[in-house]
Amino acid sequence: MIGDYRVLIADDEPGVRQLLTEVLESTFNVESVERGDIVLNKIHEGQYDILILDLELPGLNGIEILKTIHEKKMKITVVVVTASNNIETAITTMKLGAYDYIVKPFDTEKLLVIMKNIAEKLDLEREVDTLREQVGEKYRFSNVIGKSPAMQRIFATLERVIDTDSTILISGESGTGKEVIARAIHYNSNRRQYPFRSIDCSTIPQDLIGSELFGHEKGAFTGAVSRKIGKFEVTSKGTLFLDEISNLSIDMQAKLLRVLQEKEFERIGGNQIIKVNTRIIAATNKDLRELVRQSRFREDLYYRLNVVPIYLPRLRDRKEDIPLFIDHFLKKYNAEYGRQVSIDIKARIYLTNYNWPGNVRQLENVIKRLVLLSSGKVADLEQVKMILEFEGEHRIATNIASQEFNFPSEGRILSLEEMEKAYLERVLEDCNYNISLTAKVLKISRKTMHNKLKKYGILIRKTTNASY
Ligand SMILES: Nc1ncnc2c1ncn2[C@@H]1O[C@H](COP(=O)(O)OP(=O)(O)OP(=O)(O)O)[C@@H](O)[C@H]1O
Ligand SMILES: [Mg+2]
């Protein structure tokens, strides 16, 4: 039985990435990157099981990546891909702990055999882990942190519905742990031996979502060169996590509703009816009820999804959990980077009372940076404050960079000033209306900032959580 493993493909050739994705995605959860310097970050962030690594990568070359993985004893199985059939390279990569080695242009059959062997090896490891867990741990959700009353209530609700087929809607701000909960539900449920897949409705273009979800037949549209099995079919006995569901177009909402009601669908361009028993977990960081009110989300779909509502509170509303998170992430990153950093009491109190606009993800990033950057063994309040400031700016900058700027233009071209005003308002909002921070992020002086606010007549609302 092949488990549900996550594969990261690192290759700079788009053709190779596409080919590998197509070959592997019906069996594995596949993601790909093109630059070497983001591979290690990706591995740190997401828990990938297998890395398919091209040796000639821009940014950071494959051998360096392999060395780091080897030295840090990272838990990932690596298959090396290279254009040169050079015996020395082969020996080097094997010495550095690569599982196997494949030469370009490669034979997809051979790759599939390698991948199947890896999956079997991982299945076995996972079985051993599960046995260990059963012996040592009685409780479900033991990997999800939360002793606060709010989290305990969530665990109690999940305990009641976990082995049913009920649809679950998880809502909560960004970084509160929606995906963590979704995975925990699947891996603690009686569906655990079947696949878990996720689809992020905010990053996949809407015209591709249909074929991601339902698959397509060969020739269904230009570019459909072969049959594709969609995620509903792959998770027929497992769990499908629909992340950021509010981004689904009205058209896709109707199609999704039909599958939820009838438990069947056809692949795009096909006429064979496919029956599935997929469990749906949806997540949103927006208020879906409000979107229903604005007619941007179908009411009937909302009720179909919201059978079991789980609301994840903001981190600052469950302060009891903060010390647990601090210790958990300290342990994690100390182990990962071979450090022994701890945090003094004043700094801990400060962290516990901080307002965490980026929730658990922000806390995790702060602890990770602290472990990496701490010069001594005990980090103090000064260091913590410095990291918080740096992290706050960084988080806002990446938020802004990842947003699509849909400014209201009423069908005409905006003037530069109108753009500037809209952009300023957007960044201000992201900075919790903190003027110094906004000026810093925008790389202008406070004086220029004040002049612009005056010029555009922007009034600053005071918010309770402006605490950078
Ligand atoms: N209860 C928890 N126990 C352990 N780790 C957690 C918990 N909640 C969140 N995390 C950690 O915090 C980070 C963010 O969690 P996650 O990705 O699930 O958030 P999210 O709500 O899906 O955020 P977004 O809306 O931005 O996608 C992850 O690295 C995760 O490991
Ligand atoms: Mg998420």
Image (cartoon, rainbow, N blue to C red):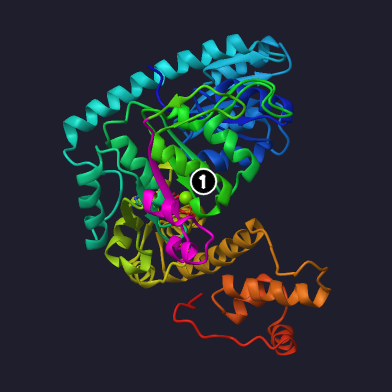
Residue at 59% over, 33% down: 211
Q: Position of residue 221 (x, y in %)?
A: 70, 29
Q: Nearer the viewer, residue 22 or 292?
A: 292
Residue at 73% over, 15% down: 84
| Amino acid at dot 1 | Ala
Residue at 42% over, 53% down: 300
Q: Secondary structure at mark 1?
A: helix
Quadrant of the rendered structure where residue 227 is? Answer: top right
Quadrant occupied by the N terminus: top left
Visible residue check, residue 324 = yes
Left or right: 70 in relation to 124 = right
As displayed, is residue 207 above or below residue 266?
Answer: below
Left or right: 262 in relation to 318 = right
Q: Nearer the viewer, residue 410 or 176?
A: 410
Residue on which disc 1 sits: 254
**Mark 1 surroundings within 10 Å by alpha-carbon count, few (fewer than 14), some (14 through 19), many (20 or more):** some
Q: How many marks?
A: 1
Q: Nearer the viewer, residue 215 or 318?
A: 215
The stretch drawn in magenta includes residue 283: yes
Q: Nearer the viewer, residue 270 or 370?
A: 270
As displayed, is residue 373 above or below residue 77?
Answer: below
Assess mark 1: CB under 8 A from ligand 2?
no
Q: Position of residue 114 (x, y in %)?
A: 53, 13
Left or right: 179 in relation to 249 = left
Visible residue check, residue 73 = no
Q: Position of residue 203 (x, y in %)?
A: 60, 47
Which residues are the magenta region? 277-304
Q: Position of residue 248 (x, y in %)?
A: 55, 50
The stretch drawn in magenta includes residue 335: no
